[in-house]
Amino acid sequence: MVLVPVSTVSTRNHPTDSWRIQRPTIQYDKCIRCMICWKYCPDNAIEIENGDESAPNERIAKMEYPVINYSFCKGCGICANECPEKCIDMEFEVIE
Amino acid sequence: MPTSIPKEELMAPGHTACHGCGATLAMRYVLKAMGQKTVVSVPASCWAVIPGAMPFRTLDVPMVYTPFAATGASISGLREGLDIQGKTDYNVVGFAGDGGTADIGLQGLSGAMERGHNVFYIMYDNEGYMNTGVQRSGSTPYGAKTTTTPVGKERDFKKENKKIVADMMIAQNVPYVATATIAYPEDLIRKIDHAKAVHGPKFIQILAPCPTGWYYPPEKTIEISRLAVQSRMFPLYEFIQGKFYLNKSFKPVDVSEYVKAQDRFKHLNDDEIDNLRKYVDERWNQLLEWEKIYSEQKE
Ligand SMILES: Cc1ncc(C[n+]2csc(CCOP(=O)(O)OP(=O)(O)O)c2C)c(N)n1
Ligand code: SF4
Ligand code: SF4
Ligand code: SF4
Ligand SMILES: [Mg+2]
């Protein structure tokens, strides 16, 4: 029995990419997979995925790595600011 | 590979918080610590609009909207109702702003704590009424510019010191009280784990920097949260059933480093920064004193 209005649609269906002015890009060949960027993203826009080829070395290639979901990244720059390897670049978006 | 905080996400992306919002990280970490069996009650605040307009929701746990002053009453009722249904394993969490806690919700909070309900009250402290356009609250620190403490020719910045609700909860002898901030999510989550082991009311005040209302660039949110602890503007402590632990394991920095990183303090001159420095030192000494008193009591 529903007595009050209930919101049921997850904001996973509500992309926020149009909010972004600056775009973060991870340089995977420098990334050490520490997941600090993932930990501090306020928009949950960094996902953890299984091993990646373009790693600095074989050991790191087997580790999980961070992938930015550009449907939700708002471009706040926290990830780039906190990355200990300084391997996330922020660049202005270009509108075609 | 294990991450330093749980991987489970109970807050979805796609919410409508500002770029670099600290309050959003506070919710994300709190839910990671609480887990799926959680009910959240949120009063009027930024967090009432962050989930988006109808029909959207951004939490994967039930969230109840409650009137501004009613968080304490709301979590009391939710708790007792769930217990009657046998759902004693659910966490009931009030998640309110500093305006909704230090000012308008204070009597409701105090009542809920006094009645001893088995609830969590999380105060996310962005040091102002941000959702309505950055007005001063009791929790705004000395020196800050807000839209109700504007700085023009009159230099009408806030002249009163921050009212610290966590300290009031210790005075009320609430079984679990802690302060935390988003630069240290591992510490925050560990504190919630400690709180979970306590049956009864629990209060945690989380400093959540706000780029929009503190006037700093959004990428600095974590840096400023860290500086708040290092400059002792926001000391981290834990009060567990009468024992008091003050976190001293950080590299101290001068108050001016914290102040200069935010434009809400831009107008302050050296004498005024010195007032803050004195306040911070006095408060730190007071906390050291508390540590002594509470440990002696328990010996
Ligand atoms: C009884 C009542 N008074 C005033 C308001 C308007 N109002 C909505 S949110 C808000 C500010 C809340 O400040 P705080 O609790 O610090 O949360 P924040 O917005 O900073 O996250 C105000 C004044 C209201 N909704 N209800
Ligand atoms: S720029 Fe901000 S929103 Fe985008 S991935 Fe980095 S931390 Fe997340
Ligand atoms: S913070 Fe930097 S080094 Fe660490 S995982 Fe993210 S991109 Fe890689
Ligand atoms: S005003 Fe501040 S607290 Fe509110 S959503 Fe924006 S950044 Fe977050
Ligand atoms: Mg507030």
Image (cartoon, rainbow, N blue to C red):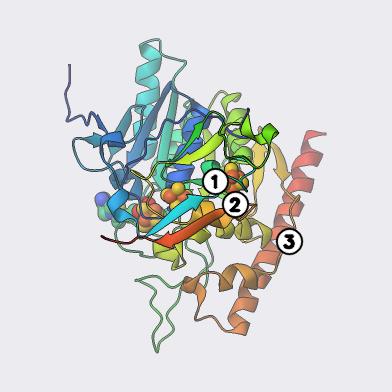
Numbered disc 1: what chain?
A: A
Q: Quadrant of residue A55?
A: top right
In the rendering, at what x and y percent does residue B7 appear?
A: 52, 29
Identify the residue at horizontal 55%, vertical 47% (top origin). Answer: B182
In the rendering, at what x and y percent does residue B160 appear?
A: 50, 69
Residue A37 shows which numbered tag? 1
Quadrant (top left, top right, bottom left, bottom right) of the C terminus of chain B:
top right
Q: Seen in the image, is B252 located left or right of residue A63?
A: right
Q: CA distance from mark 2 to mark 1?
A: 6 Å
Residue under numbered circle 3: B252
Identify the residue at horizontal 44%, vertical 61% (top origin). Answer: A91
Residue under numbered circle 2: A83
Do tag 2 and tag 1 residues touch (Cβ < 8 Å)?
yes
- All told, the count of numbered labels is 3
Q: Seen in the image, is B18 located left or right of residue B241?
A: left
**Secondary structure type for disc 3:** loop
Q: CA distance from mark 3 to mark 1?
A: 25 Å
Classify mark 3: residues with Cα within 10 Å, few (<14), some (14-19) or many (20+).
few
- Along the line of sight, which residue is nearer the eye, B295 or A54? A54
